[in-house]
Image (tube, rainbow, N blue to C red):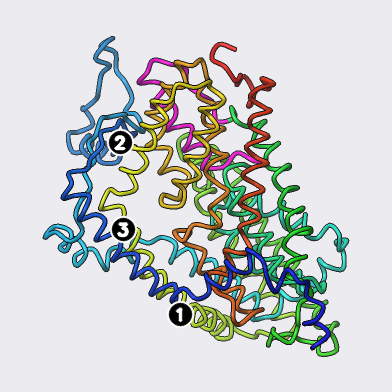
Amino acid sequence: MDALADAAPAAQQKGFLNWIEKVGNRIPNPTIMFVYLIGLIAVLSALLSWAGVSVTDEVVTPVPKDEFSQINENLGGTWSIYDSTTGEPAEVPDYIVEEQTFEVQNLLSVDGLRFFFTSFVDNFAGFGVVAVVLIAMAGVGVAEHAGMMGALIRRVVKVAPRRWLAFILIFVGVLSSVATDAGYLILVPLAAAAFFTVGRHPLAGLAAAFASVGAIFAVNLLITPTDSMLVEITNEVLATAGMETLEVTQNYYFSVASSILMAIVALLVTVFVTEKRLGAYDRSQYAGAESDDEIDHDAEARGLKFAFWALIGFIVVIAALTAPPGAPLRDPETGAIIGTTPFMASLVFIISLGFLVCGVAYGAGARTLRGGSAAVGAIAKTFASLGGLLVMFLMIAQFIALFNWSNLPTVAAVSAAELLQQANVPAIVLLVAFIVVIVLLDFILPGLVPKWVIFAPVFIPIFASLDVAPQTLLAAYRVGDSPVNVLTPLMVYLPFMVTVAQRYRKDAGIGTIIALMIPYAVWIFLSWTALYVVWFLTGIPWGPGAPVQLGG
């Protein structure tokens, strides 16, 4: 034990990151911290409201198409809209651009207090992360309780070369953004366990996976539902301005290159920064560690065989629900599978259901989980372990709802946009400044789509006047949005990262996670910005038919 402690590098005992960890871990329990933050924004909103602070901006607003369809049905299907210029019939758009004034709303006013009391239950009920966590962890909990997760990790570790393990996990994390939340909830715990199994520090595995899922979120080798939403918002702004609209693939080349290169950056940070700082792991800190002698390898092999055939059967069923024309998981209008479709909307549930099916099959084969009652018990046990996390989500939901109601994030975003708009500098300098502003705003307004709703109507015309194409601005937005996702306290999965870390270090806290993730955020931001600048200056197309400059 002493030898392991002595083996830890000196950097573990001192240094900036360790100071961050110590200070961060002294912060009150995260649930209490969000109570304090609610008090802070309440006072700030009162002061700024009394000062009459407001901003006016053009924003992209979703059109309530479902309501229009219902009205049309009630009118017998005779209602339609026409283009005011041509007089020809027109379709209802998905978004419209309109000018709105946003005043800072006082949380300490009568209206603010009324909102706090009347929305408290609804805020938590509408906090989608809670449902996503419970659904995702239900399947994973059964698989873990049955022993499949440990068995699978041991097999993967035996097959995958140790030197490639980190890159494989990181690259899967980058790709996981196609399933939005699945990477946070499934890959991060798997990565920590995989590192633990091969004798590497589990917190390094956690950090590598969290960085790949969160700090490189806005790009992928695949076209994701988020890409579709960003392009839809962009096209509504372009249509209003009379400009040519974009295809969903017009950042694709940059997205592919960014996915690969940023994964390499995350790997280098893991090997040369994170693991060197953490040093050797004291395995006695993990109370659930089991020795290889305690494992029934025959039962494990039998369980994995059952799980494999269950997985094949599950894939066949999902394929039958997806592949044929008119299948339930295809888009009912276009027939598409990828994009904003039932299949993509169901990915988290499909993945969780897959873990559930395979976990039950593994348990039957290995005789570790017998019958439906045992499976339900495994789910209940998993949910019980998430009790502290759910309490934390309760307060996070209140903070986000109150923060948004006050209009403070919108006022800050529009004010920053106005500062950039007034800057008289070359396009590339303004683009880098735009990236920096997005990075800073991500601390208070995380989420890829919400910020673009605010910024697209403001900056697309500005950069068009500088002959910068909208796909160029959208690529810059992708760079700025992701790196500090792993640092902002408003990252809703940050408490979950603490929960995972505490399996391997009981004293881990918010400070531990922040200290782990700072190097990733800094190096990914610098490397990605440098890649963007080089790409812009060399004039490489961002995607098929997507030049850097307008008319290029």
Measuring 77% from the left and 54% from the top, which residue is drawn there?
167
Is-magenta flag for residue 19? no
Q: Residues within 10 Å of mark 3 (few under 14, many from 20)?
A: many
Vertical comparison of 484 with 468: above or below: below
Q: What amino acid type is highlighted by mark number 3?
A: Ala
Q: Nearer the viewer, mark 1 or mark 2?
A: 1
Q: What amino acid type is highlighted by mark number 1?
A: Gly
Q: Which residues are magenta?
A: 220-248
Measuring 58% from the left and 59% from the top, which residue is drawn there?
182
Of the numbered discs 1 and 3, the one sitting upstream in the chain is 1
User: How far from the left and from the top, in percent, is residue 234?
Assistant: 44, 29
Q: Secondary structure at mark 3?
A: helix
Is residue 213 shown left or right of residue 282?
left
Position of the C terminus, as image quadrant, is top right
Q: Nearer the viewer, residue 271 or 65?
A: 271
User: How far from the left and from the top, in percent, is residue 478?
Assistant: 55, 39
Asked if the residue under mark 2 is in contact with the one under mark 1, i.e. CB atoms within 8 Å, the reply is: no
User: How far from the left and from the top, in percent, is residue 277?
Assistant: 73, 66
| Disc 1 from disc 2: Cα separation | 38 Å
| Disc 2 from disc 3: Cα separation | 22 Å
Task: State the residue position of label 3.
Answer: 401
Q: What amino acid type is highlighted by mark number 2?
A: Val
Task: State the residue position of label 2.
Answer: 63
Is-magenta flag for residue 240? yes
Q: Quadrant of residue 47?
A: bottom left
Q: Nearer the viewer, mark 2 or mark 3?
A: 3
Residue 411 visible somewhere in the drawing:
yes
